[in-house]
């Protein structure tokens, strides 16, 4: 346990150039406080003392702005940079040497049962504001870009960006995209075209009804 706590501190010095000394890190880094609180809460959770575990996690959330469910499994040398707004779900599994930035959500889609949160493998990095949702896996040494929304598995050694997340680099090679910006899908424009066609058809039907009514009026005279 003491070795794990020391590793939690050491990784901050490796990842954050602003860290100056142990005293400052231990007293002022909310990410470290959240991780240590989680390790305690998780120990109670494993002993099926769910209320105490959840109480610890909620107190930690109040003081740090970071919500980690006590059921989440977190490996060694986990680093939360800044951390405000980070949410980690109950069935989330995080490997070793993983880095997460502020605003990240490792959550569910709301449609799953059982294992419903992501698995983040060793050495992965989840950048600020990214949302990784569902029972998916982010592979080893992979990176999720800031603001991305990832709904599918990410292979090892890959970089994913965008909404929804798309692989742009894999094994150090940029993924070629046969992409023509002039032929971008335009669902709004397509809908307008469909509505315009419907209006034309309605106008034709209305004209036919008018002609029939006029014919009927003439025949009745």
Image (cartoon, rainbow, N blue to C red):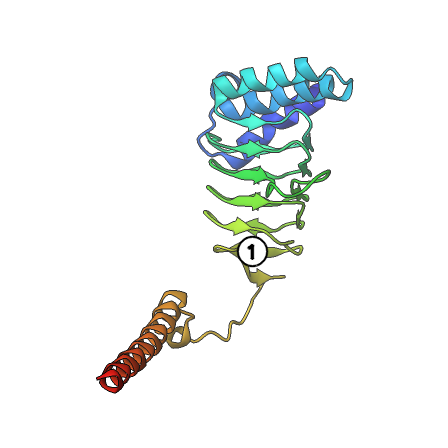
- Using the image, determine if residue 33 lies above or below residue 98: above
| SS for dot 1 | strand
Quick one: 111 or 10, which is closer to the camera? 111
Side (left or right) of 143 relative to 163: right
Q: What residue do we see at 47% from left, 31% from top?
A: 85
Residue 73 x, y percent position in the rendering: 70, 31
Q: Who's the residue at 63% across and 50% down the image?
A: 141
Whether residue 65 sits left or right of residue 190 in the image: it is right
User: From this viewpoint, is residue 21 visible?
Assistant: no
Estimate how packed mark 1 is, as few (under 14), some (14 to 19) or many (20 or more) residues with alpha carbons within 10 Å. Answer: many
The residue wearing badge 1 is: 159
User: Is residue 186 left or right of 156 when viewed as pictured?
Assistant: left
Which residue lies at the image location 46% right of the left edge and 47% below the top edge? 146
Classify 82 as above or below 206. Answer: above
In front of the other: 141 or 37:
37
Q: Quadrant of residue 18?
A: top left
- Tell me residue 5's x, y (percent): 65, 22
Residue 178 horizontal/vertical position (percent): 50, 75
Q: Quadrant of the N terminus?
A: top right
Q: Quadrant of the C terminus?
A: bottom left
In the foreground, 169 or 153:
153
In the current view of this chain or complex, which residue is farthest to the front?
221
Total residue callouts: 1
In which quarter of the view is residue 133 placed? top right
Q: Residue 59, position in %: x, y? A: 55, 15
């Amino acid at each position: 346990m003491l070795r794990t706590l020391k590793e939690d501190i050491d990784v901050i010095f490796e990842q954050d150039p602003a860290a100056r000394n142990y005293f400052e890190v231990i007293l002022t880094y909310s990410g470290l406080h959240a991780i240590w609180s989680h390790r305690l809460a998780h120990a109670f959770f494993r002993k099926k003392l769910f209320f105490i575990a959840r109480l610890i996690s909620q107190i930690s959330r109040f003081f740090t702005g970071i919500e980690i469910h006590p059921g989440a499994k977190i490996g060694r040398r986990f680093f939360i940079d800044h951390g405000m707004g980070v949410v980690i779900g109950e069935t989330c599994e995080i490997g070793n040497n993983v880095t997460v930035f502020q605003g990240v959500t490792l959550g569910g889609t709301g449609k799953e049962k059982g294992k419903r949160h992501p698995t983040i493998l060793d050495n992965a990095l989840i950048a600020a504001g990214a949302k990784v949702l569902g029972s998916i896996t982010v592979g080893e040494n992979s990176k999720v870009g800031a603001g991305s929304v990832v709904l599918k598995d990410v292979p090892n050694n890959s970089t994913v960006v965008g909404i929804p997340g798309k692989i742009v680099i894999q094994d150090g090679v940029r993924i070629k995209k046969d992409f023509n910006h002039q032929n971008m899908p335009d669902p709004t424009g397509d809908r307008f075209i469909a509505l315009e066609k419907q209006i034309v058809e309605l106008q034709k039907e209305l004209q036919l009804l008018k002609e029939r009514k006029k014919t009927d009026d003439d025949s009745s005279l």
